[in-house]
Amino acid sequence: MKPMNEMSVSFPSVSSNEGFARAVVSAFAAQLDPTLDQLADLKTAVSEAVTNAIVHGYRETIGKVTITARLYETGKVVVKIRDKGVGIEDVEKAMEPLYTTGGEERAGLGFAVMQSFCDKVSVRSQPGKGTTVTLQKNLLRRAREHG
């Protein structure tokens, strides 16, 4: 299925850009006229994925985080957050709640949060090559919900 619109943005992996990532994806997805709750869910999931790229993907270095987003006539939005950082050795293990490689200050709930706010979350990663997190969410237009 061909997207009705798409965008891509890249930025350095510094924590101050996490808010920018949330805002840009939210503004782009707003074209589908979602509810405020749906936008808040999407923003939270994007925030978690971007934070993972910054904290875990690049650890003590600065790299590039790329976000692509596609909107579909059906109301579906697909957001990919990609880094070219250290990658994940065991994706299945990393997606378990409470598992973290980030030390005591990290809760290990990032993937669980993403899954709770999205319809589908998939992770592709290769050690030494980076990670791509794909978030899918159906944002039904309010007009269709009431109409």
Image (cartoon, helix red, strand yellow):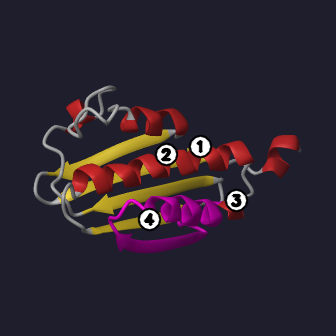
Disc 4 to disc 3, how far (Cα)? Answer: 24 Å
Classify residue 66 as left or right of residue 60: right
**Badge 1 amino acid:** Asp
Q: Which tag, 1 or 4, sits closer to the chain's start?
A: 4
> Compared to 121, does 13 lie above or below?
below
**Badge 4 amino acid:** Asn
Out of 122 and 97, give the one closest to the viewer: 97
Relative image position of residue 66 (x, y in whole percent) = 36, 68
Find out whether the residues at labels 3 and 2 contact each other: C-beta distance under 8 Å: no
Find out whether the residues at labels 1 and 4 contact each other: C-beta distance under 8 Å: no
Q: Secondary structure at mark 2?
A: helix
Q: What segment carries the magenta color?
A: 1-29
The residue beneath circle 2 is 45
Q: Of discs 3 and 1, which sits in the foreground?
A: 1
Disc 3 to disc 2, how far (Cα)? Answer: 18 Å
The residue beneath circle 1 is 41
